[in-house]
Image: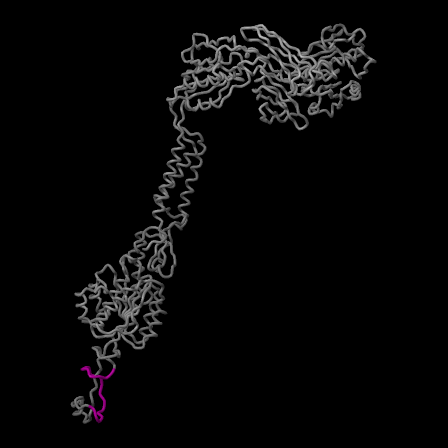
């Protein structure tokens, strides 16, 4: 268990096993699973009728309809397949600041918790890291709950660093994804709103079901713990800004940051995306279980 | 508390500059943040907004304090506290050079005893140091006895005698100052009882048998000759008669020697005839004694075989007739072209029918000077036929002149003159006057002896040669310049080289007071150079056997004077405080030096 974050305790993982991912669309999977697929299959979920053809299984003839129309129709059912789950974790430099907030750790815990939910449900998970230093996790889908350790080990080796331009980075990732599925994006989304909108809009345009998890630090919301005259340096772009921070400025800063967060939430709502905000002063397990619905997780 | 330079407080005006610097300067700390996105909404830093509220951090107040302390230090603060005042009167006159039996000079022995007599432990004792030669003066004021003693170590006795009553006069004056608690007098002369209670005499030395040269002069007996005559005055201040020997050296070469038996307390004269012409003469007295200064004397000669005359007259041809005298060179000037610088190369200057505007710095013959000039102020009575009525027979000016054959023709009679005496008298006043002024001889005639006709007018020629000889011989005498006595710097002199070799710049007409050294002084100017011998020549100072005691009487009532105080300077403490504060600030800056803060 050492590869997993401390937040993912056995008890918490046990509770995660009761959850499963719900999508707003049906996506074709790669194997049998618990999610309805647009493919015809043998599930209990009725899909359509078609005329009987020689060789069809008599068990699927709708005898009631035959009685009313004197024609033979075969009932078609949907296939149940696994869900292709894509989890994108922002490992840009901004995720490492403020250090005391441990935003990246929270993002990793969130990603692993989602991955565990998916793996425990028999879904396939592809974990992608945006930016950062270290060996990236395997680029292929992983399957089976035991692979969570492998994912945890990979994420532990990543250190937040570098500058990530959200829209181009996610566009590049989208190109490498050949099948649609459920997408989770875990980030602080500290970028210009239109950049965030363009990035998330790419997934919706590609018929993906997107859930955005914004991770903000408690200290980050409180003026990043700064006081007085400060030259603030952007961790990613290196942009410098000289400000004087007092109680009034701290409130003003917090309001601006929350307004940015609300704008992202409003965009998600408008665009049919799911959104959840996690501030690091909350207990992770409480946040995750309470935000499960917002994230598209159901019991 | 006081300040040596209160004007430095004007520098406090720069303190607002520090506030301005804090208002304008940029010294924010840096912090790395996840994004500056939300910070853009804030107003820019107050410190960068001119006129905004300055960041009055402790840095500001620390630097304000350092700046204020620096201004205070520049103002030279000091604390004053009442002090005891001691006066040390040091006899630095020439007799203090006399050596004692132990090999030390009187001055060295006196300094040692004064040092022993001072209470070095009293830190609040202020000491005023006085010297009495060449004139009584204060040599310094010191905040502690140790500082005064250190200064004493740098003082040397002069070659000059002390003025009469210099010590008693100075001590009486100090006794009148009620703030002077203690007076230490270091001298070689004994004190007569009773001695005032505040006076501590430090008397050094004992009676010393001494032989001295009282004067040494070189004169030229005849005009146109290069033979000089020397005259040495000797004094015996020992208890017994002594055979004294004087050796004359001309330009360093012994040329004459003479002896004289001198009784105790007596003064005698030795004459040296036929001395060769030289620039510098040195007389050495033997046997040697404990006071070598007065066993040596210097004199300067003309050292020239020619005799230079500057002739200033509207009729310059009159002067050219003097060229017929062997060894005489004549330079002529009209009154309009004459300048005092022309005197530089002249042994004698002759003004005919004119007078200079300032007193010449060489011996001068005035021929029929115009009346009423402000410098000489002659009052004359013109006469168509002058008549000589009286003349001295022993005067060198009239020596050998046959006055019955002397025809002075027309001219003017002089009335009574303020400082010139009549040598040749006429029927209605003086016809030839002579006198001394500014160390030089002046002769004025109411008749015109020129042109010089030689044997064609023998009485007038002899009189002319007497006048020129009288004027020429005086310039080579050496006895008039004594140590400690100032002179007027002659015209054309810009630098005076002391016997020690030290050069002092000066200007003509200035009073030259650096005459404390015995020896030959060199007077240099752009055009020429001359020498001047300065000697002790004070037999009172040379008499080390019979010392008159000093009598000091306490004044009846002390005159109030300013209360003395010891100044305790505080600038050093302020500098230490500034350094400590700077170090503190430096340490704090070093500790706080985080170029980037991980927010």
All told, the count of numbered labels is 0
Q: Quadrant of the N terminus of chain B?
A: top left
* Residue B557 % position (x, y): 42, 11
Q: Is residue B247 left or right of residue A188?
A: right
Magenta region, residue range: A39-56
* Residue B246 % position (x, y): 62, 13
Residue B22 visible here: yes
Q: Is residue A164 magenta?
A: no
Q: Nearer the viewer, residue B222 or A24?
A: B222
Q: Is the residue B21 above or below the residue B235 in the image?
A: below
Q: Is residue A51 magenta?
A: yes
Residue A268 visible here: no
Q: Is residue A200 left or right of residue A143?
A: right
* Residue B232 % position (x, y): 63, 12
Q: Nearer the viewer, residue B222 or B492?
A: B222
Q: Residue furthest right?
A: B456
Q: Is residue A239 left or right of residue A255?
A: right
Q: Nearer the viewer, residue B175 or A230?
A: B175
Q: What residue is rendered at 63% in x and 24% in y?
A: B523
Q: Quadrant of the C terminus of chain B?
A: bottom left
Q: In the rendered image, which quarter is residue A146 located in?
A: bottom left
Q: Is the residue A118 above or below the residue B78 in the image?
A: below
Which secondary structure is most common in the magenta stretch?
Answer: strand
Q: Is the residue B263 above or below the residue A61 in the image?
A: above
């Amino acid at each position: 268990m050492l590869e997993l974050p401390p937040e993912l305790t056995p008890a918490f993982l046990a509770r995660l096993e009761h959850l499963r991912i719900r999508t707003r669309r049906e996506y074709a999977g790669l194997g049998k699973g618990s999610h309805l697929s647009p493919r015809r299959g043998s599930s209990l979920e009725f899909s359509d009728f078609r005329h009987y053809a020689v060789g069809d299984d008599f068990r699927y003839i709708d005898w009631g309809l035959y009685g009313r129309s004197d024609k033979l129709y075969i009932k078609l059912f949907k296939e149940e397949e696994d869900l292709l789950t894509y989890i994108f974790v922002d490992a840009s430099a901004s995720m490492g600041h403020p250090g005391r907030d441990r935003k990246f750790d929270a993002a990793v815990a969130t990603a692993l918790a989602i991955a565990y939910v998916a793996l425990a449900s028999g879904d396939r998970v592809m974990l992608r890291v945006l930016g950062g230093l270290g060996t990236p996790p395997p680029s292929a889908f992983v399957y089976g709950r035991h692979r969570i350790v492998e994912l945890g080990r990979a994420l532990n080796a990543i250190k937040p660093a570098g500058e990530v331009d959200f829209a181009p980075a996610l566009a590049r990732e989208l190109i490498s994804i050949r099948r649609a599925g459920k997408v989770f994006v875990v980030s602080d989304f500290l970028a210009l709103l239109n950049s965030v909108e363009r990035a998330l809009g790419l997934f919706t345009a590609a018929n993906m079901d997107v859930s955005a998890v914004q991770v903000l630090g408690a200290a980050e919301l409180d003026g990043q713990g700064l006081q007085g005259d400060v030259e603030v340096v952007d961790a990613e772009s290196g942009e410098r800004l000289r400000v004087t921070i007092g109680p009034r400025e701290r409130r003003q800063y917090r309001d601006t940051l929350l307004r940015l967060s609300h704008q992202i939430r409003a965009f998600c709502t408008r665009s049919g995306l799911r959104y959840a905000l996690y501030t690091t002063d909350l207990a992770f397990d409480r946040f995750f279980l309470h935000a499960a619905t917002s994230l598209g997780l159901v019991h | 508390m006081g300040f040596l330079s209160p004007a430095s407080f004007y520098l406090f005006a720069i303190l607002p500059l520090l506030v301005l610097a804090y208002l304008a300067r940029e010294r924010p700390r840096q912090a790395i943040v996840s994004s500056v996105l939300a910070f853009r909404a804030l107003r820019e830093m107050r410190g960068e907004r001119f006129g905004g509220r300055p960041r009055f951090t402790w840095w500001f107040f620390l630097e304000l304090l350092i700046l204020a302390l620096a201004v205070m230090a520049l103002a030279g603060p000091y604390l004053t506290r009442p002090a005891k005042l001691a006066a040390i009167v040091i006899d630095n006159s020439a007799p203090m050079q006399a050596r004692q039996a132990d090999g030390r000079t009187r001055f060295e022995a006196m300094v040692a005893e004064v040092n022993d007599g001072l209470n070095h432990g009293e830190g609040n004792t202020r000491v005023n140091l006085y010297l009495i030669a060449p004139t009584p003066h204060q040599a310094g004021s010191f905040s502690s006895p140790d500082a005064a003693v250190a200064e004493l170590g740098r003082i040397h006795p002069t070659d000059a005698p002390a003025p009469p009553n210099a010590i008693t006069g100075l001590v009486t004056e100090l006794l009148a100052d009620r703030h002077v608690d203690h007076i230490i007098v270091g001298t070689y002369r004994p004190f007569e009882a009773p001695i005032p209670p505040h006076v501590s005499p430090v008397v050094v030395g004992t009676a010393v048998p001494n032989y001295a040269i009282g004067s040494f002069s070189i004169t030229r007996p005849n005009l146109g000759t290069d033979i000089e005559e020397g005259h040495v005055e000797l004094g015996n201040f020992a208890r017994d008669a002594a055979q004294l020997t004087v050796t004359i050296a001309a330009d360093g070469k012994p040329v004459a020697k003479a002896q004289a038996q001198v009784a105790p307390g007596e003064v005698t004269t030795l004459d040296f005839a036929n001395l060769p012409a030289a620039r510098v003469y040195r007389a050495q007295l033997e046997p040697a004694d404990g006071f070598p200064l007065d066993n040596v004397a210097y004199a300067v000669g003309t050292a020239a075989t020619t005799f230079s005359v500057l002739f200033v007259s509207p009729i310059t041809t009159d002067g050219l007739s003097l060229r017929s005298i062997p060894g005489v060179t004549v330079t002529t000037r009209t009154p309009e072209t004459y300048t005092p610088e022309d005197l530089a190369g002249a042994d004698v200057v002759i003004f005919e029918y004119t007078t200079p505007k300032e007193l010449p710095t060489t011996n001068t013959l005035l021929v029929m000077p115009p009346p009423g000039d402000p410098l000489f102020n002659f009052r004359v009575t013109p006469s168509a036929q002058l008549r000589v009525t009286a003349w001295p027979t022993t005067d060198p000016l009239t020596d050998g002149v046959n006055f019955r054959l002397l025809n002075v023709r027309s001219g003017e009679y002089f009335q009574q003159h303020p400082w010139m005496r009549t040598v040749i008298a006429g029927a209605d006043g003086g016809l030839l006057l002579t006198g001394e002024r500014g160390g030089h001889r002046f002769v004025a005639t109411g008749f015109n002896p020129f042109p010089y006709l030689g044997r064609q007018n023998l009485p007038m020629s002899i009189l002319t040669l007497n006048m020129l000889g009288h004027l020429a011989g005086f310039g080579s005498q050496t006895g008039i310049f004594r140590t400690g006595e100032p002179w007027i710097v002659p015209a054309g002199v810009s630098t005076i080289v002391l016997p020690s070799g030290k050069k002092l710049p000066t200007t003509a007409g200035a009073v030259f007071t650096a005459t404390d050294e015995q020896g030959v002084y060199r007077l240099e100017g752009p055009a020429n150079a001359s020498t001047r011998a300065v000697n002790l020549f004070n037999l009172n100072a040379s008499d080390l056997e019979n010392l008159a005691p000093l009598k000091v009487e306490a004044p009846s009532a002390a005159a109030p004077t300013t209360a003395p105080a010891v100044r305790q300077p505080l600038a050093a403490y302020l500098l230490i405080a500034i350094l400590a504060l700077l170090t503190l600030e430096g340490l704090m800056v070093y500790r706080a030096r985080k170029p980037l803060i991980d927010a």
